[in-house]
């Protein structure tokens, strides 16, 4: 039986004793994730004087790995290590690509070496956008293109409003469909 995070602990008690339970995991363990999220929130608050709780991603308490015989994880070895306490084998899965582009053998990699793309979904602080912006503010010779749901987390942008207006090297694109021509052009440029 395979179940995601929070449901497995409750369901496992109703399964036959010989049934193998597999926890499908797609994040770090909730305790590790939530501790890190709050640390990021406090660090941002201390640096910028703004609280932006909508920009962190908290995970509900769950005992999925505790009720499992095995885990499968969309993540890295770092994420995998957050489940080591449980003593259960946790296998890493490849993240399936949502969009597949043809390889561009003529891309100008030398010309794009100073242009970067930040791509993320919700949880801008959780994903470190604030740290990336601050790094690029200190490196005006580098170009940063930011793609993500910026309008959903206005406090983060407000925190950098003054700097971003005077920083031609940082471009905010908002949400960009990864299958769109706009995204393809950005990947060719960066």
Image (spheres, rainbow, N blue to C red):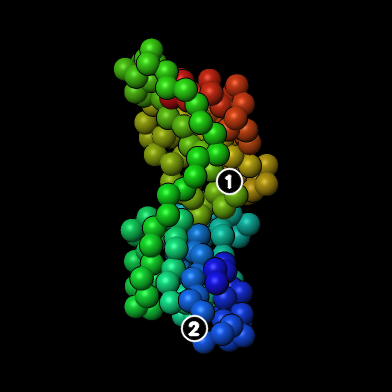
Q: How many marks can you see?
A: 2
Quadrant where the C terminus sits is top left
Q: Nearer the viewer, residue 108 or 137?
A: 108
Q: Which residue is mark 1?
A: 121
Disc on the earlier residue, 1 or 2:
2
Q: Is residue 125 above or below residue 189?
A: below
Which residue ends up furthest to the top in the rendered image?
A: 106
Element class at badge 2: loop
At 38% from the left edge and 78% from the top edge, which residue is drawn?
Answer: 86
Is residue 40 among what the camera can see? no
The vertical placement of 73 against 61, above or below, is: above
Q: Position of residue 187 (x, y in %)?
A: 48, 25
Residue under numbered circle 2: 18
Is residue 157 shown to the viewer in this render? yes
Residue at figure coordinates x 50%, y 60% from the top left = 26
**Image position, residue 129 (x, y; %):** 49, 45
Residue under the image location 49 percent in, 64 percent down: 25
Relative to 7, say whether 78 is above or below: above
Callouts 1 and 2 close, C-beta under 8 Å: no
Quadrant occupied by the N terminus:
bottom right
Instruction: Say which residue appears at 52% left-offset and 87% top-offset.
Output: 17
Query: For this rendering, which residue is in front, 89 or 40?
Result: 89
Measured Cα–Cα span from mark 1 to mark 2: 40 Å
Q: Indicate the position of residue 130 as horizontal and vertical percent values.
A: 48, 46
Q: Position of residue 48 (x, y in %)?
A: 51, 51
Q: Nearer the viewer, mark 1 or mark 2?
A: 2
With 131 as the anchor, is 7 left or right in this view? right
């Amino acid at each position: 039986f395979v179940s995601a995070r929070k449901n497995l602990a409750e369901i496992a008690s109703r399964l036959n004793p010989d049934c193998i339970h597999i926890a499908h995991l797609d994040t770090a363990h909730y305790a590790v994730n939530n501790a890190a999220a709050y640390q990021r929130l406090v660090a941002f608050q201390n640096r910028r004087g703004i609280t932006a709780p909508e920009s962190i991603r908290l995970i509900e308490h769950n005992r999925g790995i505790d009720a499992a015989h095995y885990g499968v994880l969309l993540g890295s070895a770092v994420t995998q290590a957050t489940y080591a306490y449980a003593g259960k084998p946790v296998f890493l899965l490849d993240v399936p690509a949502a969009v597949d582009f043809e390889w561009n053998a003529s891309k100008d990699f030398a010309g794009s070496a100073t242009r970067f793309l930040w791509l993320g979904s919700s949880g801008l602080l959780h994903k470190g956008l604030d740290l990336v912006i601050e790094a690029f503010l200190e490196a005006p010779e580098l170009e940063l293109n930011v793609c993500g749901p910026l309008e959903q987390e206005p406090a983060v942008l407000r925190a950098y409003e003054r700097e971003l207006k005077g920083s031609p090297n940082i471009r905010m694109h908002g949400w960009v469909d990864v299958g769109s021509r706009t995204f393809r052009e950005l990947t060719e440029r960066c």
